[in-house]
Amino acid sequence: MSRSPSPPLPEIKSLYIGQQFEDFPAFKTAMRMWAVSDPRKFTYRFKKSDKTRNNVVCVHAEKGCPFKVNATFSTLKECVTVIVIEDDHTCVGTAPVQRSIASTQAWLQEILPSTITITKATKPNDISDAVAHKHGVVIGYEAAKKAKKLALGDDLQSQAAQFAKLAAYIRAVRAADANATAVLTTHDVRGVQRFHRLFVCPSASTQAFNHCRPLLCVDGTFMKEIFSLTVLLAVSVDANNHAVMIAWAIVEGESESSWWWFLSHLHTAIPNINNPLTTMISDRDKGLLKADNEIPLANRALCVEHISRNLQNTYSHPSRLIFNQQIRHALTEQKVQAGFAALHDTSPNAVEYLEDIPLILWSSPYLLGKRYGHNTSNLVKVMNKWMLEEQRMCVLDLLHSLWSKCMDLRFRRLQEAKIEDEKGAILTKHTTKLLQESMDHALV
């Protein structure tokens, strides 16, 4: 996410005696802009810098370079005035000057908005190339990397400051969507209230779920920033087989406590989820096994891909192969049992592992609920990929982006549905496609 655009700074070609500035920071900014816009690309240092005066000399002053600029603060005029300029340089060639990280950052933050648009995808080398091309100044990789972090607010201080704004964010969500469920909790850390958990479910999700298949996939994903937090997601499927983000939360990690908290608020936000027709798919790992009792009436289904991976990691690749080919997609009890028999010949221990998992939680012939062709929690993985950029954002930017992308996606799908309705379509595009494929198959 790029930072808010700033107006470009005026290009300062030189300074002159009598030139006035509001304060010394403004004078220092002018010096930086002059140094890089001047064809000589000179480098300078402050010989004296206090509340009443700033004396600037060339970095090679000890070698006899006469360049200097003196500025003083006038209490009468309440401004800084340039009083001395010696503009001769006897030391500087035309080659770009390598600048240290410490002396570069203030200048970089001033010129970057008019030099290059910085996003999460911007590489430090892109910044270095843009600065060299436009300003003729060579900056190192680490300087560019630090400049990117500062520009995006990715440093520790900037990220920590976003947590202080979460209470205001929750109020803003409730003001914009009175029926949304937005919850923020904190906990006491040595007498100071610190962030604990945050849950968001737009009111549109309640309406959306009522028009989705009664299917709910839940999973968690890591935030890839300084603070190690986890995003919990609840995803459903619409009539066009599109994944629909229902709710999200930011928590300290996946545990029984955090999953119970998430599902409890989800149940409150969308009571219809707790329904005998609903099927909830998960890996039932990291606390979900006990926490999913918060939605007691819904049917349970395990992620079959998760079971498949466990077979390979714990037993052998052939075990997973037999499971995937003969058991995973079996539609009758007879085929399931035949698959078990084949697996037993290869790995009896793998059969014992599967027998410890109730068939009603993962095998189609025994499953209590319907999965509508989705036998894994990969729907959440799809959303993880969809929000790949958000995982690298600071907490407030992530929340804002998630809300905006979800609302934008729903609006676009609504417009598509209206177009189909105006055409007189009775079935969705996905249903029409399935029906046509079935008819074609019947004719073969």
Image (spheres, rainbow, N blue to C red):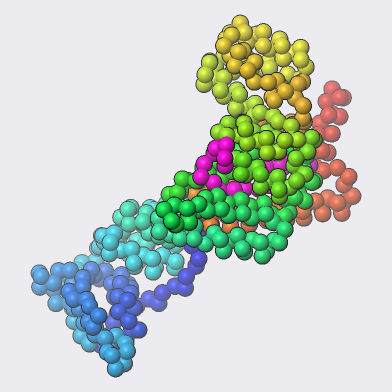
Q: Position of residue 370 (x, y in %)?
A: 77, 31
Q: Is residue 101 above or below residue 276?
A: below
Q: Quadrant of residue 312?
A: top right
Q: Which residues are magenta?
A: 234-258
Residue 98 included in the magenta stretch of the image = no
Q: Is 248 above or below relative to 67?
A: above
Judge whether residue 257 is colored magenta. Answer: yes
Describe residue 121's horizontal placement relative to residue 283 as left or right: left
Identify the residue at horizontal 71%, vertical 11% (top origin). 337
Question: Above or below — where is 22 with respect to 142?
Answer: below
Q: Residue furthest left?
A: 63
Give the image location of residue 235, x and y in percent: 67, 42
Residue that appears at 75% across and 46% down: 271
Relative to 351, is 413 on the left or the right?
right
Q: Residue at x 50, y 66 (%)?
A: 4
Residue under the point 18% across and 81% down: 86
Tell me where residue 37 appears, x and y as whole percent: 32, 72
